[in-house]
Amino acid sequence: MRGVLGFLAPKLLRALIAVWLVTTVVFIVMRLSGDPVPLLLPPDAPTSEIYRVRRELGLDRPLPVQYATFLGNALRGDFGRSIHFREPAWGVVVRYLPATLELGLTAFGLALVVAVPIGMLSAIKRNSAVDQAAMGVALVGQSAPTFFLGIFFILTLSLWAGWFPTSGRGGWEHLVLPALTLGAFSMASIARLTRSAVLDVLRQDFVRTARAKGLPEAAVVMKHTLKNAALPVVTITGLQFGTLLGGAVVTETVFAWPGIGRLAIQSIYNRDYPIVQCTVFLSAVLFIVLNFAIDLLYGVLDPRIRPR
Amino acid sequence: MASSIPASVPVDGVAGVEAPAVRGGARALRTRRLVVAGGLFVLALGLMAIAAPWVAPQDPLRQSLRARLAGPTLQASDGKAHLLGTDHLGRDVLSRVVWGSRVSLTVGFAAVLVGGLLGSTLGILAGYRGGFTDSVVMTIADAQLAFPFILLAIGIIAVLGPSFTTLIVVIGLSGWVGYARVLRSQVLVLRSREFVDAIHALGGSVARVVLGHIVPNVFSSLVVVATLELARSIVLEATLSFLGLGIQPPTPSWGVMVQEGREYLHSAWWISTFPGLVLMLTSLAVSRTGDWLRDLLDPTLRGE
Amino acid sequence: MSHLTRRDLLKSAATLGAAAALAPALPGPAGAQTTQKRELIVAQGGDLARLDPHFSTSSNDIRWSFNLFDNLTSRHPDGKLHPGLATEWKLTAPTTWTFKLRSGVKYHNGDPFTSADAKFSIERTYDPNVKTMVATALATIDKIDAPDATTLVVHTKKPDPLLPARLAFYGGQIVPKKYVESVGNDAFNAKPVGTGPVKFVSWTKDDKLVVEAHDGYWGGKPDFDRLVMRPIPETAPRIAALLKGEVDIITQLPADQGERVAGTPTTRVAGALYAGLYVMAVNSKRPPLDNPLVKQALSFAIDREAIVKELWRGRGIVPNGPIAKGDNHYDAGLGPLPYNPSKARDLLKAAGYKNEEIIIETTVAYLSNDKQMSEAIQGMWKDAGINAKVEVIEYSVRAQKNREKSFKGVFWSDPTSTLGDPDGMMWRLLGPGGPQDYWRHPRWDELGNAARFSVDEKFRAQAYKEMTTIFLEHFPWLPVIQPYEDYGLQKYVEFQPNPNQQFEIRRFNFKFKRA
């Protein structure tokens, strides 16, 4: 038990410092980026009005004081009131979160379900036409800008073929195109990574032995490689999750999806500091917790990596 | 001290980690042919970028509202040939693609340079010094990875104002972690080898060890990460353009062109399709080259 | 109650004439279609920010607050003032307006509407304790009396000929006194109650706003049971949603996409000539823009005809000065602003222009086509020997620059004619202390001030004529286009848009075509 604790404690500390760094950077960047007040008032409002609203929002105080207040409140889970929504920022972000989780998890599930088998198939049938085609598509998936892909899907699969709704949130059919768009990048990465991980394993001695014993290729792959190849795949999965919110910003805008990606970007444009701070904090914590879990999973998947 | 994010896999963000080539006749030949094709493509683009003023058939900024949104044609209503059509201001798409290669490639290479210098310095430092330095660098890396990058980019650009330099710095900054992590782990391995101790024992300076022995040893990894980053940077420039944060008009870049043409995708598809195609092919060729370089150069594979 | 429906539509159609509020619909294949739908779905470019009408002036919001609420007076698609919650009004003393209010009107929650609500609503806009966002909209008012339930007497600080017009626009929406006072401002914003043709049901931010027809509406129940608004920010998906039949109406249809919508058998385009202008406002304090000759050259070097015809596909007209077509005192005899690059060159030479850089600060899609027009104009200016540069700024930066009056050169603005009168447009924005006060001219100021407080329309006409002449010498704005505000509709939708970005959806301007 103490061993595990000794392994976890420094990591936890670093995770906490990382979250603190992220929140501090976002605080500074947002404050430097401009004033939310002119956006709240009609263009012909007198200057006295501006000062009144600034005072009301606490924006007239010196920056260090604002920062101290922000940190103190954040520690208690209070991210302040949204300037735009006029309600607690935390409540707003939490309301937007399910839509993004729904989209993100579907995109990710879709990516895994499609990419892992394709990657494995590619590895087994390496250099075949299947392999070349799959890896070609994967490369395209990685090099097409997300917004272009999204609009392309809407025009072809929705408007032209009529299979899916063009945009908005609703039943499962609303989920397909945005999930495909958001997941395309991860799907491509995971497929290529799976392929290379499986190839790596296939070249190792125990697999060669198994093959020499005359076991069918598929059985060899299933039996020996899955677990070993899972390691890098799980890792990249954790890291890809971090790019998800970034992708969500674009995907949610294209598909009019009411999630935190769209909330975040609108809030940046509105200079709604509390919402931006809260969103970034939440996604950083999610990311770090997830990768923490993956770290632990490592120990399970690969006994060679022992907690130090 | 390990990072809380496993560093055993290079964090390339864009291209997955490709398999080392299984050395064998037909495969190697085909790979080489593909790589040669990719390399030639990138080279051709580079030449095109340098020679843009002579290659481009027209002035990329020359507008002709009366000939706007013309499809690929030999004679548009302004009497000129537009092989790839004209855009929403009647500018020649082909000429803009040619000139756009300048901006897109410059942004890509410059961003790679910024990210590569910063990342490899920090990575080597962390790996070499270890201890507290390592912790600090890797904590910053964790923080950066946990930060939804696009939001950070928007924030920074909002502060500094969109410009060519800002764009390069922002894209470059977004990529440093990849280099740092790969180099750190490699330096960790190298440092534990006897020759480093031997040099120290002989009174060699740290700088000499790093420049004379570590850098040459990690250079191949650096090149591999750099190619992957280059592909990512070019795509990222397009994404930032979509969010209104890219190159300032009227300067053409592929990203800007794809972005500007997206509203016309169903009526004037050529505006964003051609630059999009070139963008994708470039990114493809560059990351293919990267994969191949990895196979060729990766010292951890050389021993096998 | 139906006197405001069919007849009114016909009447307004007849009075259009020179005002030309109704755009010619683009040609499309014939074949009228019908529907049995009872639900209307509208997609617009952005979500609402706030439902409380006194807390927002953004066009995405007022499209809805003018449907949830009524004003005392109402500006119809014909550009004229019609009765709203007030049935008649007159000037009873130089500084006193008396309004006769409609009786028997009920709020969505069943409460009756009385003069106390009107008094409360108007006073609420400038009550310093409420801190509304429309505090200056009705600031000419001194005090309000409500002698009986259907009479409202408004005393202004100085004579205000335009008070009824002011009450038709933002700030003038009438909210229920009893309800607002009992639930508080935040709860009112979350669940607004008005007298308008639709009542609030639910609002899921960035997803959809749902409202229902108000059965007892005094103007007649609108031709639907339910109305859903979906924000779809990107243009291509918004149009795809219309073409695929997922939505019935889309707002902010770019001119370039009109043909596509008109060319689809099931959809069509409807537009209204914008009650206002798209102008490049000039920071006349920055050299060389402090020189009227340079500004004249800038104006001569803009090929507005090409912008209207090509960039806007004809969906707009070339302005002739600072007054929008359709407004009071618009001078139909004045020709469109001319394009003459060689004259521009001469003027530049006379002005001693030394190739100083002129910066065009533009947002992307804050006004439609803003970036494209900026690039086009930069090209035109370059051809005339003007060294111009386009800088793209984001909307919040624009708002801040607007506030600080720190624009570097010229910048886009879409002055809305809030009152159907130059006072609510050029004088509101360019007047002393106004948001675009970058240029002063003693005579111009004197005239503007006198016209604001005069109830003599002949005098006002003369004043605005002279102000236009001065304007065309100094160009504090470079008017570029008066565009159409276009909407994409299913063919089974009959809808006549309002020119001032309101999206009134009432019996007199909307119905489904039934089989």
Image (spheres, coloured by chain):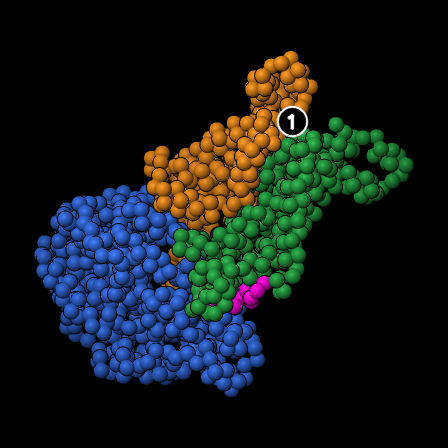
- Measured from the top left, where is residue B222 in percent x and y? 70, 42
Residue shown at the point (68%, 30%) measured from the top left: B22
Residue B4 at x, y percent in the picture: 61, 31
Q: Quadrant of the C terminus of chain A?
A: top right
Q: Amino acid at mark 1?
A: Asp
**Whole-percent x, y for residue B230 in the image:** 63, 47
> Residue B264 lies in what quarter of the image?
bottom left
Q: Nearer the viewer, residue C208 or C380?
A: C380
- Residue closer to the observer: C235 or C145: C235
Rendered position, C148 above or below C334 = above
Q: Chain of mark 1?
A: A
- Label 1, secondary structure: give it: helix
User: Viewer-proximal residue, A150 or A260?
Assistant: A150
Q: Which residue is mark 1?
A: A200
Residue drawn at 43 percent across, 81 percent down: C340
- Spot the blue chain and give its letter: C
The residue drawn where x is 27% and y is 83% is C462
Is residue C441 found left or right of B296 in the rendered image? Answer: left
Residue B58 included in the magenta stretch of the image = yes
Q: Main secondary structure of the magenta part?
A: loop
What residue range appears in magenta?
A: B56-65
Where is residue C486? Give x, y as percent.
30, 60
Q: In percent of the image, x 39 and y 47: which residue is there?
A: A155
Q: State the hue of chain A.
A: orange
Q: Is residue A134 magenta?
A: no
Q: Which chain is green?
A: B
